[in-house]
Amino acid sequence: MNVKRIRKDFPFLKRKIIYFDNAATTQKPRVVINAIKDFYENHYANIHRGLHRLSQEASRLYEEAHEKVAKFINAKFEEIIFTKNTTESINLVAYSLDLKKGDEVIVSQMEHHSNIVPWMMRGVKIKYIPVKDGVLEIEKIEDMITRKTKVISCTHVSNFLGTINNVKEIGKIAKEHNILFLIDGAQSAPHMKINVKKLNCDFFAFSSHKMCGPTGVGVLYGRKEILEKIKPFLGGGDMISDVSFKGFKVNKLPWKFEAGTPNIVGAHAFGIAIDYLKKIGMNNIFEHEKKLTNYALKKMEKIKNIEIYGPRKRAGIISFNLKGLNPHDIAMLLDARAKIAIRSGYHCVQPLHNKMGLKGSARVSFYIYNTKKEIDIFIKSLNEIANAL
Ligand SMILES: Cc1ncc(COP(=O)(O)O)c(C=O)c1O
């Protein structure tokens, strides 16, 4: 993987910022930025609504993006629904399933709020797979399952601890008990090769903006047989095949779940982002981030008064604190001293922070354009901050 060449593709690097906030959102390569401009200048029209050539072109490009996403995770075209983001994808599932009061949903203690709050809003009973030493206690799931358990919904990679969960194993348990299984892939799809057919899942959710694509586009993969059975999430244009004053018939998949004008241009640009990532190679991306993470961890462990959270073996996410300093101060000092962008706070994982007795943490997270040299600058600044305490 030629990082030097990759860095040339990212215009933001001209600002000489060290961007370590990739778990929040990633920067965009020039090909994606250009694709947005080109679409608006040359192909823009609404989709599935016009017979004129511009509408035909826009529809083709929009559908091509579905096709690219489907291939990217080894799904069928009909199984790919475009949403606004991972959050909306999870909400879509929560609201489309026929859940009743008293039904139970199992999530984990390391979930992002977007995989807790929608279930709370649905009024179901939520059970939490415990986290011990930064790892899920998967062996406890069997005992948590009852006749009322309808869904297990779990993150693939923790956006706080960096833990890579054995979702395949969780999926196997769900399958054995005939329970639906949703994977929150917001932090995995951008960084590793995903094959939904091998993960034993019924749903898989992720966001374009965390993988070089634009904001406003999310993906929900759903197994065809299930998508055919469940009811649509939102009603309106394009999700219907027939409407009368009395009722409506739903459209075929995936349009059944895409009501109203979607993010046409964003979806196309997301397809271009996927082309870009595929060219680099998802396995190369994973290996590159593994090297950076191990390099950073080794150096961070030596810093005075540091507390690092999560297991040693992890994805490219490291959350930490310096004893005696607020994580927001760490973030502000790193930005002021060396133009290093990191995240601070709860990272939308407040319940687990609270369980660990933390009022937040600082977090660095890596992507394809990051280098060991950038980590060296970060370590130098962090050492200076720690030593000044
Ligand atoms: C694990 C995880 N799930 C879900 C989300 C929500 O993603 P989005 O804000 O794109 O909906 C995030 C975002 O940080 C995340 O890290």
Image (cartoon, helix red, strand yellow):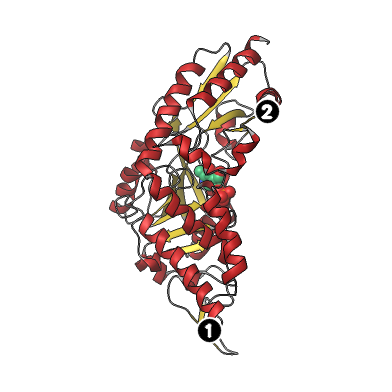
> Do labels 2 and 1 touch, CB within 8 Å?
no
| Vertical order, 236 against 343 (above or below) | below
Q: Is residue 259 above or below residue 242?
A: above
Q: Where the N terminus falls, by quadrant?
A: top left
Q: Residue at x 55, y 78 (%)?
A: 55
Closer-to-camera residue (34/159): 34
Residue under the point 29% across and 48% down = 172
Number of numbered tags placed on the structure image? 2
Circle 2: is it few (<14), some (14-19), or many (20+) Cα within 10 Å?
some
Q: In which quarter of the image is residue 312?
A: top left
Residue 382 x %, y %? 60, 18
Q: Tell me the kind of residue under disc 1.
A: Phe
Q: In the depicted view, which residue is nearer to us: 222 or 284?
A: 284
Q: Mark 2 sits on what residue?
A: 335
Q: Would you say residue 112 is visible in this rendering? A: no
Q: Which mark is residue 248?
A: 1
Q: Residues within 10 Å of mark 1 (few under 14, many from 20)?
A: few
Q: Nearer the viewer, mark 2 or mark 1?
A: 2
**Image spot of residue 116 (x, y percent):** 54, 47
- If you read the primary sequence from the N terminus, does the residue marked by circle 2 or circle 1 appear first? 1
Circle 2: residue type: Asp
Instruction: Please report the residue visible at 59 percent of the width from the left and 25 percent of the height from the top.
Output: 357
